[in-house]
Every structure is written in C-alpha cells, then in structure tokens.
Image (cartoon, grey):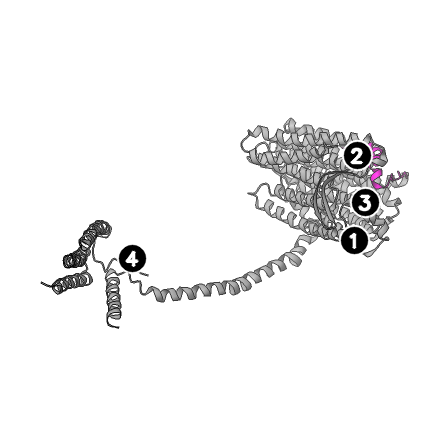
Amino acid sequence: MGSQFVLIVSASIFCIGATGFLIRKNPLVMFMSLELMLNAVNFLLIGYSHFLKSLDGQIFALVVMTVAAAEVVVGLGIILTIFRTRHELNVDEIDALKG
Amino acid sequence: MFYTWLILILPLLGFAGLSWFGDRIPKKLVGPVGCATVGGSFFFTLIALIHLLSMEPGERVGNVQTLYHWIQSGNFTLDLAILIDPLSVFMLLVITGVGFLIHVYSIGYMEKDPNIDTFFAYLNLFIFSMSVLVLAADFFFLIVGWAFVGLASYLLIGFWTEKTSAVFAARKAFVMNVIGDVGMVIAAFMIFENFGSITYMDVFAQAPEKFLANDDTMLLITLFLLVGAFAKSAQIPLHTWLPDAMEGPTPVSALIHAATMVTAGVYLVARCHVLYDLAPYTMMLVAAVGVITALFAGSMGMVQYDIKRVIAYSTMSQLGYMFLAVGIGVYSVGMFHLMTHAFFKALLFLGAGSVIHSMNDEQDIRKMGGLKESMPITYYTFLIGTLALCGFPLTAGYFSKEAIIMSSWYAEGSNPVFWALAIAGAGMTGFYAFRVFFYSFFGTCRTAEAHPHESPTIMTYPLLILAFFAIFAGFGAPLAHSFLAPVFGGVVPEHHTNGFLEIIAVGVALSGIIVAAIFYAEGGEAEGKSDGLKELLAPIHDVLFRKYYIDELYDVLIVQPVKKTGEFIWKTGEQKGIDFVVDEVGAQVKEMSRLLSIWQSGKVRIYALNMIAGTVFVLIFVVFL
C-alpha cells in the first residue's frame, strides 16, 4: 500500500463528512459529520507518521482528538440548551443572529 | 482689625456647615446654628463700630484691609481686601442686626418645613453675599457680592420648589437682576479703562481731577452703574420682579426684599457719590426715577389684595424715596431712611408673616379680618410698623421720610415738582398701609374655618424688638448723620425746619390714613363684594390692579419675541437644519450596513458552504495558478 491509498481514503472520508455537514439539518448528525472530517485528518496524520518515520503526526492526532472531545462537550451542551428552550433542532430555523 | 474678616467668614462657615451637615444634625439645632453665625457677625460689626468711633472722624474713611494680593497682571492688580468705613459699617449693622432678628423669627416660621436646614444655609449664604457687597473695597468684589445676593435671592424665592408660581417668580427675579449685573460689569470695564484701577480709593481720588462735571464718560459710567442699582432696587423700569418675589417664604421677603438686598442700589449710589457728584444729569435721573417709582408703586399698592404684595409695593415706593434723597445729593438722609425703613419694613413683613402663619398660609386680605383680638402682639407691632411707614409724627419713619421731603424742597438738585410728587406719594402710603391694616385686623374674620392664634414667642420677640426701633430709631438721626459725614466729604445735611411745609407733609399723610379709615374702618369686604374704593376708582381700578399692564407690555415687547425667535431657531434651525443633516448621515450609513448585513443570514450551513467554497477557491488558486 502506498501513500496514495491513505490520501484517497482520507480525502474521501473528509468529503463525506463535509457533504454531510452541508446537507443535514439535524445538529447531532452535523456533529457526527464534523467528527468524520476530523478523523479523516487524523487518519492522514497517522498514515504519514508511518511513512515519514516520525512520531510528530501521531502526537498531533492525539491533540486533535482531545480538542474534538472538548468541542463536542461544548457543542452538545449548546444543542441541549437550544432544544430545551426551542423544542426543535432544525439548524435552518435557528437564525437568531441574522443581520 | 483682623476680626473684621470674621464678619464675612462666619456666615460663610454657617452656609458650608449647614449645606454639608445640615441633614445629619437634629432639626432643632439647625436654626440656632444659623442664627449663631449671623449673631457672631453682628457682634463683630459692633466691635468694628466701636473701633471706628474711637478714631478721629477724619481717619475713619479709607481703612482698606488687605488679606493678600490675589491677581497681578500687567497694570491690573486685584487684592482680596475689605473696606471698613462708616458707610460699610452702617450697612453691616442693618444687615447683620435686622438679619439676626429675622433668622431668629425664621426658627419659628419654618419650624415645620422639612428642608429647614437648606433654608438656613441659604439665609447664611445671603448674609455672606451681602457682607461681601458692602465690605468690598473695589468694583470687582462689589460685583461678586452683587451677583451672589442675586443668587441667594433666586434660591430663596424659589425655595418652595413644588410651587410653580414661586419657581417662575425666582426665574423672573434672576433674569431681571442679571440685566442689572451686565450694566455693572460694563461700568466696571469703563472705570478700569479710564482710571487704570478698580479700587474705590484710586477711582474716587482720580475722578474729580480727571473729569469735569457732566463729562460724557462720567455720565455713561454712572448710567451703567445705575442699571445695576435700578434692577437690584426694583425701580422703574426694572421693577416687575419684586412683587412676584413675594412667592418666597415671608422671612425671605423681610430680609432680602425689604430690609437689605433691595437697598443695595441706594448703597451703590451713596458709595459712588464722588462719581455721581460729577454727573448732575444722572443725579437728576436718579431723583426723577425715584420719585416716580415712589408714586407709581404707591398707586399700584392701593388696590392689591395680597398682604405681602401691598407691602412689596410700599417697599418699592420707599426705595423710591431713598433714590430721591441720594439723587438730590443728601446721601446720609437717604441712608438714614434706608435704616429706619429696614426696621419698620422688616417689622411689617414679619407681622404679615405672623398673620399668614396663623391663617394657615392665607395671604388674601379679603379672607382675613378681626385679628385684633386673637393676635394682640402682632396687632400692636403691626400698627407701629404701619404708623412708621406712613411717617406718623415721632415714629422713626417720620424723621427719616420727613427729612427727605424737606430736602426735596430745599436741596439744590431738587425742584418743587419732586417735592409735590413726594408729598402725593406720602398720601398714598398712608392710605394703602392702613387699608391693609384695617382689612386684616378690624371687623370680623371672613374665613369661617380659620382659627387665628398668636404666634409663638420666638416669632413675637423679634417683632417687639423691631417695633422698639421702629418707634425710637428716628431720634438717632443726628448721630447717624454725623457718623456718616466723613464718607460724604464731611457734609452734614442741614436740618430744615419750616412749620408750614411740615404741616402739609404730615397733613397729607394723615389724610391718607383718614381716607383709609373712612372706607375700611369696618374691616373691608369679602372677596367678590365691591368695596367703596373700587367704585370710586372704577375707571382706573383695573389699570392699577393689573399693575399698569407693564408685565403684559414686557411680555409682548420682549418675552414673546424672544420666545418666537427661540422657536424659529428650534424648529427651522435645529429640526430642519442640524437634525436633518445628522439624521440623513445616520440613515445612509444604516442603508449601507443593511446591504452588507444580507451576508449575515444566520444559517450555519450557508456559513459552512462559504467556508468550504472559500477554501477550495484558495486551494485552486495556490495549486493551479
């Protein structure tokens, strides 16, 4: 397996994640898509860590996972609060910051 | 004589202390503190008097005490200095002496007022300002004191801020007085330009050498000074504020608008007599305005129904006599009338206050009547005050006013017309003074629910003391004249005796009293009923009652045009001009913002799309181009 395989898989997962983020209206699903994108990048980092014989990429991947976990905590908290106050979870309806 | 500064500083401390701590000390303590500072000033004034009397008459003038040099700029110097001479001490005796009695009276009168601490703070401020005015050794501090008494007057007229009419009256008084202040300031500038100094000593020493009589400059300076004097002393045509000023608490009317502040104009002319002696035309004007005001105010006073307003008109009228006296050059006669007037007019106002107090703040004499039995002390003291005001023989008013009327016959600067008008004014005085007297104290009480009662002793003692002076002060005339003589170039006014003229003067005053007795001895009529006078004066009654329509005239000539101009500038200049530009700039910015804000849709997915599209665009740009 060459590095092309890693690149293609990573790019595919990233595009699936990005598309999912754009077309879904449920914030939970959007979060999952977000995770997909993050993990696509992690995959790339770990793969290239292997090819380049450097641990930097793996450490980077760990940091990204930590940040993602923290972000999900905050995000879920916001989503819960929005659901409690508005009783709906359609991101197109949530446009209170419209100019 | 360092203690003379205490005369000024004590009331100032009283004002500062009562303003800062007045609401934290017990209410009962406020009045005594306010009185104590003024009493202290009076005490030190007495010491200053004794000190002056111990000097040779020639040394009594020109005692300027400098505390420090305040301003030195080019050839202009200004010292913080006060002038102790017979004239200023004479004025101080009236200010602090009568002022002290009125302070004591106020303890009783304002007892129930929740803001009594503010009231006493303002009263102390007034005493301080008035002392600055008379102790000033130069025109600068004269104007400072002049403006400060105006401020104190404004604050005290509008003391009852919940009363709209009082607030308007205060504003009117302030505006009228500022007109006078402007005149004073212009005069001070002209004095500095011509003499290079503004201290009395320099100016009065140089004036006779530099200028001939009736020099144009001299006339202008004296006329501008006179604007200030007329505004402060409520002389025609700047008189309309004084009757309205009666909206204030009665002790204020007694202190400021009868005994002291309104006499500042007379003091000014007397103080600047060196300048006025060089301007005979101005002197003529002073005398003419004085005597016309005396007559004019008397005629308005004859038909008013508000007890305080009638006394206010009589104040204007008596001030007119004082101006007549200084206008014909008998300065110390005018100053002596100033003092006796302070006694009997303060007495009348405090008596009126006592009546108003017991009638539950009723000021309309048509609703009074029959107070003779229920208020004996007020009745007798008021009678004494009224007699003194009319110049009844052997009262204080007789000696001082008679001297003015006699001088108006004999003095060089006078003429028989002034004398005749002064006599006519005296007749009116007798009439309106006793009209009020009969209305309030005779007959039966015309308000059923009123329970008139004598005022507490703290209010009646000042009345008794003032009544004593209103009777006996007149015998001090020779003493006062010789005391004041050094200030007025050593001239003691001649004492004229002419039995015939005296009989005419007294006779006219007495006939005024008799006419009042004929109409009102039964105690006057209630509201709505026509009294004898009204029918007699039918054609001109309304003109007199509406004060010759002068307020209306000023309204049409000055107030309305100013209002219209203001409204024009407001509606056209501001609303259509400035506001339009400001609003339009704002609207354009808003419109541009609106166009930009379309981008901010609030939809997360569109933001994400933009982000991805942007990233792709940048990638394409970097990789392929």
Tell me the distance, in whole angstroms, between the alpha carbons under discs 4 and 2: 87 Å
Per the rendering, the mark at residue B88 is: none
The span shown in magenta is: B470-497
Q: Quadrant of residue B388?
A: top right
Q: Position of residue B552 (x, y in %)?
A: 66, 54
Quadrant of the drawing holding the C terminus of chain B: bottom left
Check disc 4 and report the residue beneath it: A96
In this rendered view, identify the residue nearer to me: B134 or B291: B134
Label 4: how many Cα within 10 Å (few below 14, some 14–19, many 20+): few
Q: Residue furthest bottom?
A: B625
Q: Is residue B270 above or below residue B56?
A: below
Q: Are marks 1 and 4 on the same chain?
A: no
**Host chain of mark 2:** B
Residue B542 in the magenta stretch? The answer is no
Residue B489 in the magenta stretch? The answer is yes
Q: Main secondary structure of the magenta part?
A: helix
Tell me the distance, in whole angstroms, between the alpha carbons under discs 1 and 2: 42 Å
Asked whether the residues under the numbered discs 3 and 1 touch, taking CB atoms below 8 Å apart as contact, a structural biologist would say: no
Q: Residue furthest front?
A: A53
Q: Is residue B115 left or right of residue B503?
A: left
Per the rendering, the mark at residue B326 is: 3
